[in-house]
Amino acid sequence: MWYFFFEEAAVSIADIFYLSAYIFFFIGIVLTIILVNESFFKKNLQWILIGTIFTFIGYNYFFPISWDSSTSFIENIVISGYILVDFMLLGGIIMLISSIISGTFATFWIFMGIGAILTFIGDTYYALNSDTYIGGQIFDLTWNFSYVSFAIGMVLLVNTARVAMQNTINR
């Protein structure tokens, strides 16, 4: 629909909804870390945030996010925003996986991490090649595989929670 109002628009209202979902996903990660391992969270948060910031700076040094003056300000912000929120998401998932690697829900978070990495790869490729992007390219599969990984993770979460609840009831 956005295309009909603003011809050649690569950004739509769906991007705003999609980006806003990252906020809730990141809040869920942080709350899970606090719930599962609060001491790990308090002890390592500053180092993980510093590492994420330096990784983001290093990434932008080697793969600078293009700012195309021929496109709109909003489109440039959205393209850059995907990379920024992907880094936040990866930092949170890495922190979570490292805090519960041997726990009951570790497999769920590993699949969520794989999905986040695949999303990051697709978003990075798009940010670097947004001016020549044509839908249906092979790298679009990174997003499809990330959604499959998220779905597998959710199925594993439901099954793990079901078994845990059944074990609690049987006690």
Image (cartoon, helix red, strand yellow):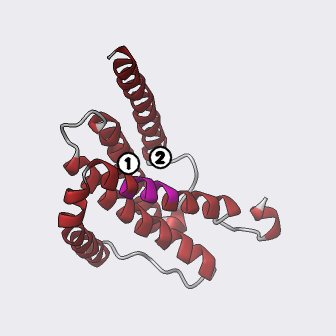
How many marks overall? Answer: 2
Q: Residue at x 33, y 50 (%)?
A: 35
**Between residues 171 and 80, which one lies in front from this camera angle?**
171
**Between residues 138 and 83, which one lies in front from this camera angle?**
83
Quarter of the image with the C terminus in it: top left
- Mark 1 is on which residue type? Leu
- Tag 1 near tag 2, CB within 8 Å: yes
Question: Which residue has dot 1 on it?
Answer: 118
Q: How would you classify the magenta stretch by its main secondary structure?
A: helix
Q: Residue furthest top?
A: 170
Q: Residue at x 32, y 56 (%)?
A: 34
- Mark 2 is on which residue type? Trp
Quarter of the image with the N terminus in it: bottom right
Residue 28 colored in magenta in the image: yes
Question: Which residue has dot 2 on it?
Answer: 143
Camera sees residue 71: no
Residue 100: % across, % down: 23, 44
Q: Is residue 68 left or right of residue 71?
A: left
Q: How packed is label 1: few (under 14 Cα within 10 Å), some, or many (20 or more)? A: many
Camera sees residue 82: yes
Residue 60 colored in magenta in the image: no
Picture layout, residue 69 above or below residue 44: below
Q: Residue furthest front?
A: 171
**Between residues 62 and 167, which one lies in front from this camera angle?**
167
Q: Secondary structure at mark 2?
A: helix
Picture layout, residue 81 above or below residue 67: above
First reached walking from the N terminus: tag 1 or tag 2:
1
Residue 90: % across, % down: 33, 57
Q: Is residue 11 left or right of residue 33?
A: right
Q: Residue at x 41, y 69 (%)?
A: 84
